[in-house]
Each structure stands twice: as structure tokens, then as C-alpha cells.
Image: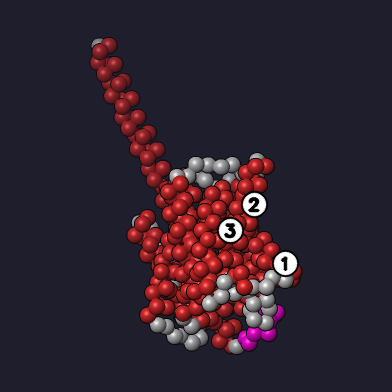
Amino acid sequence: MGEKRSKFEVCDFGAWAMNVLSSVGIIMANKELMSPQGFSFAFATTLTGFHFSVTSLVGLVSNAAGYSTSKHVPLWELIWFSIVANTSIAGMNFNLMLNSVGFYQISKLSMIPVVCIMEWILHGKHYSREVKMAVTVVIVGVGVCTVTDIKVNAKGFLCACVAVFSTSLQQITIGSLQKKYSIGSFELLSKTAPIQAVSLLLFGPFIDYCLTGKFISSYKLSFRSFIFILVSCTLAVFCNISQYLCIGRFSAVSFQVLGHMKTVCVLSMGWLLFDLEMTLKNILGMALAVIGMVVYSWAVEVEKQAASSRIITSMKEQNVKLLSDGTEHCSLKDLEFGVSKA
């Protein structure tokens, strides 16, 4: 049991590490690709369509080669999930465009309590006091090191609400679909990715036009920008797979909390690679966020051990009751047998 648990924990860490590394990598690649100082490729929604197209191709090759199996999931559920996921992508893009970076960061931080409330409403899930305290510490820490100016308008606020709600619902739905249909993370991704790819490639250019005022057809593609698009798509495959892996292994709340480690890594990488200013406020905020993540991991482990103890105690009580009922039943039979023999 100990060896099995150790292997499971290694797989958990591997899934989380893959998500952090691929997410940080794709942010760095997209920063170079989209920034005016880089290649000025400002078509974020269409780029996401490219990401899911490559992911779909990888899933198709994997199924054809026999590395993964295709399980049945109703088409209406796949379409519903794709609508929610694409709404999340478009909402986040509009959120960033219409609001200040400070409010955008606050909206991302608000996803943790929103996910908690939605899991409580949809699945009746409850959280211990320690988990709530750890989540609060993480939110405060990330907020301190990322939130600067806060400006918002009515349209921006509405887009932020849609983005937060749809992203939270998407992450909860991934976990529930995996459990409901006993389907692996990659198998589920290979089913949803083609629908998302087609819809994003169809509607993405128009969404990007609303954001930038330009169509992708006006962009002059160079060899170097093409290479960066390929790098971004490759990292997106690992990012998408690891996201499904993490939500399948952890809860949506755990994924959000651990995901803020990416924010800390991005800030650190920006400081090392792009000469971004690192103030005492940033350092203190990152330290507080890391402490919150450590405390959260400990609180979740304590919660798991308490749940296991309750299950073991319940099983022992049931076994004692069964033994007691069996003994009473045997005594009654012996008494009846003795009487009949007399």
C-alpha cells in the first residue's frame, strides 16, 4: 500500500509539474509572439484555435496507434462543455482588453471562492476551516504581488463575471465528466478538442477583430513567427493534457490554488529574462502565496486522513455489528435445537 501510494504521489507531482512548466513556457512564448517588441501576433483567440487543432491531431494519432482508447461520451455533453470552454477563452480575452491588469488579476483570484461556492451548490462539497484559511492566504499573497491599478467599467465587469463563471464551470465539468464516464484525461481531451478547434477557428478571427480591429489575414507571417506559433502549439498540447490530468487527480479548487504557483513562476521568469522590476512588495506577496500553498497542501492531506479514518472506523463498527448479529443468531439456533432435541 505504501509503495502504491508513493507511486500515486509521484504521478500527482508529475502532472502538476507538467502543468506549471508548460503553462509558464507557453506564457513566455506567447509574450514574445504577441508583444509589439516581438512578432506583434495579436490574434489570441485564433491562436487558441491553432492550439486545439494540434491537440486534436495528437489525439487522433494516439487513437490510431492504439496508445489511447475512445470511450463513449454523449455528443450533447461534449458540445455543452465546448461552449462553456470557448466562452471562458473569449471572456478572458475581453476581460483583459476592457479592464485594467489589476482588475483582471482580481477576477482571476476570485475564481477560487467561485469554484468553492459552485462545488458546494452542485456537489454539496464542504471545506474544513484549515483549507479556507490556506485559500485566503494564497489569495492575499498573489493579490499583493500582482494587483496594481484597479479600473473597471460596466462592460468590463460583465465580461469578467462571464469569464470567471464559465472558467470555474469548465474546470468543475472536466472532473465530473471524467468520473461520470470513467474516462481518462487524454481521452476526454481528444473528444472535446476537435469541437473547440473548429468553433474557435470559425469564430476566433471575428472575436480577434473586435479586440484588435484587424483580421488575421492582414498579418504578414515570417519564418521566425511561424516557428514561435509551432512552439506555442506544442506547449499548448502539454498544457491542455496536464490541465485535464490535474483536475482529474485533484479537485478544481486544488487546481486553482496550485495554479497560482504559475503566477509566482511567471513573475520570477519575467524578472530573470525580461528585466521586469521586482519590488519588496512582489517578494513578500510571492512568499505569502507560497506559504499559503504549503499550508493548503497540508490541510488537504489532513482532510484526506480524517476522511480515511472515518471510513475505517465505520467499517470496523459494521464488522462488529455483523459479528454481534451473527453470534446472537447462532445462540438462538442452538437454544432451539436443544429444546427440540429434549
**Residue shown at 34%/60% (left/top)?**
121
Magenta span has 168? no
Magenta stretch in the rendered image: 270-278
Report the residue that reaches farthest toward the top. Answer: 341
Reading the image, the residue beneath label 3 is 52
**Residue shown at 55%/54% (left/top)?**
193
Residue 227 placement (x, y as % from top left): 72, 67
Residue 318 or 135: which is nearer the viewer? 135
Marks 2 and 1, Cα distance to the nearest angstrom? 18 Å
Q: Which mark is residue 58?
A: 2
Residue 282 seen in render: yes
Q: Which mark is residue 326?
A: none
Residue 333 or 245: which is nearer the viewer? 245
**Within 10 Å of the Cα at label 2, are there few (<14), some (14-19), or many (20+) other Cα atoms?**
some
Q: How many marks?
A: 3
Residue 5 placement (x, y as % from top left): 59, 50
Query: Please, what is the three-letter code of the amino acid marked with disc 2?
Result: Val
Query: Please, what is the three-letter code of the amino acid marked with disc 1?
Result: Ile
Query: Please, what is the three-letter code of the amino acid marked with disc 3?
Result: Phe
Report the residue that reaches farthest toward the right. Answer: 223
Q: Which mark is residue 227?
A: 1
Residue 13 seen in render: no
Q: Is residue 13 left or right of residue 332?
A: right
Q: What element does badge 3 sit on?
A: helix
